[in-house]
Amino acid sequence: MAWFVLARALFIAAVGYSAFQLHPLAAGEIPNITFGLVLGLLIVVFEIRLKNTSVTHMIGALLGGAIGLAAAKTIGAAMYWANLSDGKVVFLHSIILLALPYLGLVLGARRGEWLEPANLIGLFRAAGPRKLYRILDTSVIIDGRIADICETGFMDGTLVIPQFVLKELQLVADSSDSMKRNRGRRGLDILQKIQKMSGVDVTISDMDFPDVREVDLKLIELARTLQGKIVTNDFNLNKVAQLRGVEVLNINELANSLKPVVLPGEIMKVFILKEGKEYNQGVAYLDDGTMVVVDNARKMIGKTIDVVVTSVLQTTAGKMIFGRFIDATVAAQAMPAPAAIDGDIQRRSRAQMPPSAAAAGK
């Protein structure tokens, strides 16, 4: 970094010295030196702004500007018959000479992604099925479940990892907070694991959008450019992308759809882990992380019991199951004995029989 600062300072000094020697302004030495230093500083600021611009966009700008300049010279040469002594003709020549290179420069810089190797190869490749792009964001990489999904073969297409996502992941991995640092390193390990999988096409995209600051909006613009889908588990990014017309593959929605369906009245076996918020409640969790709230289970903490499902609540954050534990001893006390039931039935039947039938029965 120090070498860059030194080189920039020497460059500014060289421009100022050149202005001092050549006197571009019809003034004294101080105005010329000031003019040279300010000009050198502006060039350095322009160079700093170009630092975050991708190589393909810079090449596109140069090619576009050159094509625009060539077109302007061609049009100017074609107008040899015009009267160059007329001020209107001279003004028209000037406008053409300035406008066409400018338009070529701007359009070439905006469409610089066309010069990427993958897009250039696609121009000469035979027409076939369109390539599918799945763009990963930082949250789904840190989450780690995307590696398991790729390993099963359910994730089709090409996985695109943008450079700005890698930069954000690296910032998290270099964080002073130990928890964030571990999450960032886990995300880098997940990416390395996905790259080593056979049959999974992974590409690192250099496409960037300097005018857009937020990473989520950069992902949306990249998905629009590649006509791909964003893979995420960020709820807010999911909503914003859908509002902007970009398709999203949400890992949390996939996990919720794969959870087993439980209906009220079914009996399930759960392990009571802790006490619930309400009176005499216990809380258990299924293997997929679904919370099960069980009534009458406070005394059964640390035990595996059978519960009867009473209701299922589906929310945007996931699914909650409510159940009730029926104690066998309480149920036995509440239920009358079979002998007592038989005696009661016999007494009721005799009371309803006519006297003649009762005498015959005796």
Image: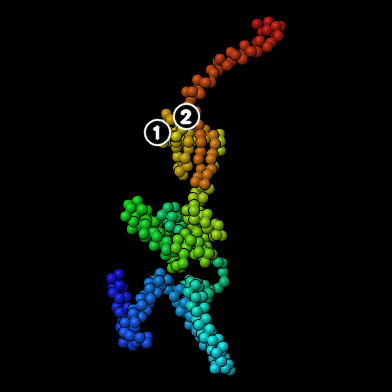
Q: Which quadrant would the C terminus be assigned to in this image? A: top right
Residue where numbered disc 2 is placed = 296
Q: Position of residue 158 (x, y in %)?
A: 48, 63
What is the three-letter code of the residue carrying label 1?
A: Gly
* Quadrant assignment, res 47: bottom left
Q: Which mark is residue 29?
A: none
The tag earlier along the polypeptide, 1 or 2, is 2
Q: Position of residue 291 (x, y in %)?
A: 47, 40
In this view of the protein, which residue sits in the foreground, 261 or 340?
A: 261
Residue at (56, 92) in percent of width and height: 86
Residue at (33, 88) in percent of width and height: 22
In whole angstroms, how far apart are the C-alphas of marks 1 and 2? 14 Å
What is the three-letter code of the residue carrying label 2?
A: Asn
Is residue 22 toward the left or the right of residue 125 in the image? left
In this view of the protein, which residue sits in the foreground, 337 or 330?
A: 330
Describe the element under mark 1 as helix, strand or loop. loop
Q: Position of residue 270 (x, y in %)?
A: 46, 36
The answer to whether any part of residue 224 appears in the image is: yes
Residue at (49, 72) in percent of width and height: 110
Q: Which mark is residue 302?
A: 1
Describe the element under mark 2 as helix, strand or loop. loop
* Quadrant assignment, res 193: bottom left
Vertical relation: 197 (above or below) 278 = below
